């Protein structure tokens, strides 16, 4: 990318053995430059071992989770906004959420800190954070994430999607406000964030972007070919449309 840099992040590392294999294969094929790890999912331990075996330590952040699986900590379990009666995460992103109660805030902070600490205990430096289903872009949750990132000395946090088609004016204004808070906290590593198709849309409009993060979700199709689970297309064909994609860097490489 002229006059800038690109981060290609593979989400959902640690979700399952299949996802883990696909993320590692994506690195080996030059289709991603960083990944984020889910600390509460079944594939976590294997993902950590793979990160060590394939020398990915400076390329792994944390995919913070409040919407899937079980929490690592007990204090968050009694709050029905976050956990169901069986103790599994059930946080919904529907509708605005400007405030949560102080006890809820403390419980969320403890959980997110535990997820980061579990990754660090496994020997991963934690280059950045983002979140499953983008829950950190909910206003009340973002406040907690910013505080936790500062306390845990995590350097970068993913922006809310701010490029590509289909963002109407109210959502654009909300995203601008969310991203301004991330930037004011000193946690923004890039100027833009979106899917691969969003970054391609930016490139079509301008060749000088500054910096951008593109998100992918590696898995395999029925023929064991790398596939994007969200876009539902071949991963190599998708990512290779970005000029200079093989020069993408990780958040761990940013000064």
Image (cartoon, rainbow, N blue to C red):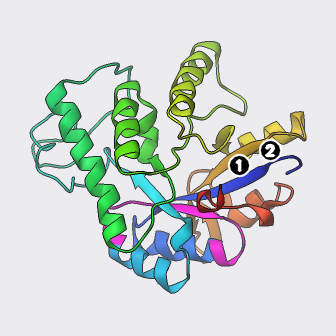
- Place of residue 199 in the rendered image (x, y in percent of width and height, measured from the top left): 75, 43
Quadrant hosting residue 208: top right
Disc 1, disc 2: CB below 8 Å?
Answer: yes
Determine whether the residue tagged by mark 1 lies in a helix, strand or loop. Answer: helix
Q: On screen, 9 above or below 176?
A: below
Q: Is residue 42 above or below residue 78?
A: below
Q: Which mark is residue 90?
A: none
Horizontal side of residue 11 vs 153, given as left or right: right
Q: Which residue is mark 2?
A: 200
* Residue drawn at point x = 9 percent, y = 39 percent: 78
Q: Which quarter of the picture shows residue 201?
A: top right
Dot 1 alpha-carbon crowd within 10 angstroms: few under 14, some 14 to 19, many 20 or more: many
In the picture provided, is 2 more to the left or to the right than 198? right
Q: Is residue 70 left or right of residue 176?
A: left
Residue 69 in percent (x, y) is at 27, 55
Disc 2: CA contacts within 10 A as few (<14), some (14-19) or many (>=20): many
Residue ID for mark 1:
196
Spatial CA distance of label 1 from label 2 is 6 Å
Picture coordinates of residue 198, whole percent (x, y): 72, 40
User: What segment carries the magenta color?
Assistant: 27-44
Tell which of 28 and 144 is nearer to you. 144
Q: Is residue 210 visible from the viewing direction of this image?
A: yes
């Amino acid at each position: 990318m002229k006059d800038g840099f690109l981060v290609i992040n593979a989400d959902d590392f640690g979700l399952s053995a299949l996802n883990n294999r696909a993320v590692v294969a994506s690195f080996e094929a030059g289709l991603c430059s960083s990944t984020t790890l889910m600390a509460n999912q079944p594939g976590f331990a294997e993902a950590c071992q793979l990160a060590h075996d394939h020398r990915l330590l400076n390329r792994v952040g944390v995919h913070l989770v409040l919407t899937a699986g079980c929490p690592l900590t007990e204090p968050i379990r009694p709050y029905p906004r976050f956990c169901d009666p069986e103790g599994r995460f059930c946080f919904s992103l529907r509708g605005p959420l400007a405030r949560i109660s102080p006890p809820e805030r403390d419980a969320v902070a403890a959980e997110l800190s535990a997820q980061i600490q579990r990754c660090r205990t496994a020997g991963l430096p934690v280059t950045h954070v983002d979140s499953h289903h983008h829950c950190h872009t909910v206003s009340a949750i973002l406040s907690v994430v910013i505080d936790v990132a500062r306390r845990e000395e995590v350097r970068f946090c993913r922006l809310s999607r701010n490029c590509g088609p289909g963002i109407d004016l109210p959502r654009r204004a909300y995203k601008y406000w969310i991203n301004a808070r991330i930037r004011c906290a000193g946690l923004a590593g890039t100027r833009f964030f979106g899917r691969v198709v969003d970054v391609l849309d930016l490139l079509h409009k301008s060749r000088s972007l500054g910096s951008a993060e593109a998100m992918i979700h590696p898995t395999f199709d029925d023929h064991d070919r790398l596939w994007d689970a969200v876009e539902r297309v071949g991963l190599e064909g998708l990512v290779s449309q970005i000029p200079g994609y093989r020069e993408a860097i990780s958040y761990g490489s940013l000064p």
